[in-house]
Image: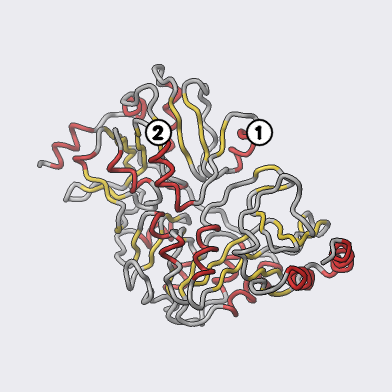
Amino acid sequence: MDFQLAYKEKQVSNALEAVLWIEPNEDIVVPLAVGEPAALINALPSHQDLKGNRLFQMLSLHPVVEVAPEKVKIISMFLNKDERRAFYDKEVDLLPNHFSDLPVILQEISQNLVLMATVSRMNRKGFFSLGTNCDYISTLLPYAKKIILEVNEFMPYTYGENQIHISDVDVFFENHQKLPETPEIPLRQEDEMIGKKVASMINNGDVLQIGFGAIPNAIMNYLTSHRDLTIFTEMIPDKVVDLFDAGVVTNAKNPLHPGSLTATFAFGTKRLYDFINKNEQVQMYPVNQTNASCFISQIDQLVTINATIEVDFLGQCNSESVGGRFYSSTGGQGDFGIGARMSSNGKGIICLHSTAKEGTISKIVPTLAKGSVTSTSKNDVDYIVTEYGVAKLRGKTVRERAEALISIAHPKFRDELREQAKAMGL
């Protein structure tokens, strides 16, 4: 096959020409975050013949596309800041999920599947790379009725199970735009305190799942003297590059690709994208491998680090709603929480500040707010960490849990929390 000839034959000049390949009643699935093809999505409202289509998105980094719902129903699998407003305005619906289950869920519920994605330039063997992504998209490629691509020279070429051959592509166009980047996050004193505590819980030789945010950044700042860590995570954040540069990460215990970092997507700055580009020490795998509890439970010394919004006296963690209103979704927290619980010498760590709204609200609460979502159950929770300490909950009774959690709450709320625990018989 002449790959360059195929490239010329399948290339169109703009996004609208590409999306015109989509027919009514076809389901459109796009990668999450950086891999989302923004130009293709923004061209959908100009496609006059769409009707009964559905668009599945996750952790979108762009505003919600304005399209009539009878043409395209938008379904989010992880609400972003724009989608939260759109959800309550009934412009977007939300699909509950464990991240690892999405490949199966999307296969079960989707018909006439169209995949759209941002990819790297084609290599000499005719392969594009999903670059920052693998997620659920790679698992759906064999089932796709159509594959439509947005080729971007700024998308890194990465390895693993995230390549698409030109022979499988129906149509594409080139759109060379700089990739979305994570914002600079200033660290608060509470982040530093939590980071130091969590870093002290991580041992040399551990396998680490960690993500993006102030607390993960603070934790990684305190890991520079550790040795022989393996990064086996769902998302690669910028700070991982620092750990590589410091010689902290060897990835010797990676169960999928020994010696390499494994993830299912990446989100950071240009520094991270340059680091993963054509770097064989980075391998992208489908989410039903990186996040599957039955698989990651077999990893020795697995340490998972996640964040939550509030924790009740039983240890139930609400990581998805504020005041009973949806804020985000489960992501991989459930997957890794269960996996860490079953891992030999594993630790499941969930972090949060002790207060919210400038210290006026305790995030350690007697019961979750009405309408709240339980993201991590009382049976899966292990460690809870605030700036005031570490509460080991696994193996503790309900009364012991209440006592342990009150001890790491903000001091000004502890007396009130104790009185509430007494009133509840705890």
Residue furthest top as drawn? 48
Which residue is depicted at the point 34% across and 43% down? Answer: 140
Which residue is depicted at the point 33% across and 58% down? Answer: 277
* Local SS, label 2: strand
Q: In the rendered image of this protein, does residue 330 appear above or below residue 404?
A: above
Q: Which amino acid does label 2 sit on?
A: Ile
Is disc 1 surrounded by few (<14), some (14 to 19) or many (20+) residues within 10 Å?
Answer: few
Residue closest to the eye, 1 or 402 = 402
Q: In this view, does 157 lie to the left or right of 221?
A: left
Assess whether mark 2 and mark 1 are in contact (beta carbons under 8 angstroms).
no
Is disc 2 surrounded by few (<14), some (14 to 19) or many (20+) residues within 10 Å?
Answer: many
* Percent of width and height locating residue 30: 41, 40
Residue furthest left as drawn? 1
* Percent of width and height locating residue 305: 56, 66
Residue closest to the eye, 281 or 305 = 305
Q: Which amino acid does label 1 sit on?
A: Tyr
Residue closest to the eye, 421 or 42 = 421
* Percent of width and height locating residue 225: 51, 82
Q: Which of marks 1 and 2 is nearer the N terminus?
A: 2
Q: In the rendered image of this protein, does residue 393 appear above or below residue 179?
A: below
Q: In the rendered image of this protein, does residue 398 appear above or below residue 2?
A: below
Mark 1–mark 2 Cα distance, whole angstroms, equals 22 Å
* Local SS, label 1: helix
Residue behind mark 2 = 28
Q: In this view, does 350 lie to the left or right of 254?
A: right
Which residue is depicted at the point 79% across and 59% down? Answer: 366
Residue behind mark 1 = 88
